[in-house]
Image (cartoon, rainbow, N blue to C red):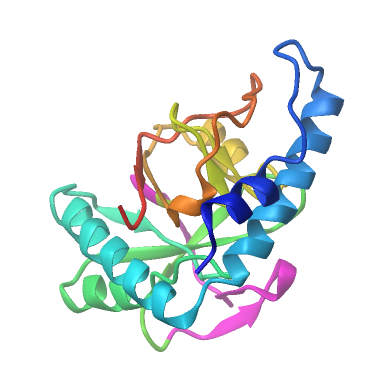
Amino acid sequence: MASEKTMQSASSPAALPPDADWAAVREWRKQTRAGLIQVRTGISASDRAAWSDNISRALLEALDSSNATIIGVYWPFRGEYDPREVMANLRDRGTRLALPVIVERGQPLVFREWQPGSLMTQGVWNVPMPESGQAVMPDLLVVPFVGFDAQGYRLGYGGGFYDRTIAAMPAKPRTIGVGFKLGRLETIHPQPHDIALERIITEQ
């Protein structure tokens, strides 16, 4: 199990002044992201299973009460919480789900409908995505994070895909961030382009 001391040292490479410019914030995020991913991928199998069960229960409860028409989910990557069991559960109930597709760097994501047995292909970073299908517009997004802060701002992988996608959607979707508590930060030093998540779910 990752200790609190290890988590803090890995996720906080250096303090930043409140008026730090974007170049400094970007470098801080890069170092913080690398530290958090290292800790996350080192979680023991028993802790990962127990924490994931807690997240799954809370996530299912939140989604059951959401009345969402189409839910955007994700395929796990680099030690992220794995939502695939929840996805299969929702599909069994008839819920429509969609997975993100990176069409081009610097552009919003496209969501394609997914169900068990959908033909998948390797996308950017070798993350599986639906090979084909028409784009759909989720009204709720389940968003993975590397880190998060008390204001709901998310530290991702640095591509800006989710912020760009949410900003471009004609109707802003509801958002639920999911991941492990070890990603908690005092602040991610949000910038004007960052969009806060409405809700965060961790194992606690």
Quick check: is 85 in the magenta stretch? Answer: no
Where residue 99 appears, as percent x and y from the top left, is 48, 64
Q: Name the quadrant containing residue 52.
A: bottom left
Residue in the image at 78% along x and 45% along y: 30
On the rendered structure, is 193 left or right of 17? left
Where residue 148 appears, as percent x and y from the top left, is 51, 40
On the rendered structure, is 115 left or right of 158? left
Name the residue at the top extreme: 19
User: Vertical placement of 192 versus 188: above or below?
Assistant: above
Q: Residue 190 versus residue 204: which sits nearer the camera?
A: 204
Instruction: Provide the residue span drawn in magenta.
Output: 118-141
Where residue 12 appears, as percent x and y from the top left, is 69, 40
Q: Residue 198 versus residue 6: which sits nearer the camera?
A: 6
User: Vertical placement of 186 versus 117: above or below?
Assistant: above
Where residue 184 appears, as percent x and y from the top left, is 50, 43
Residue in the image at 44% along x and 30% along y: 150
Residue 106 appears anywhere in the view: no
Quick check: is 134 in the magenta stretch? Answer: yes
User: Vertical placement of 136 versus 14: above or below?
Assistant: below
**How many numbered discs, if any?**
0
Q: Residue 185 versus residue 176: which sits nearer the camera?
A: 185
Residue in the image at 65% along x and 25% along y: 189
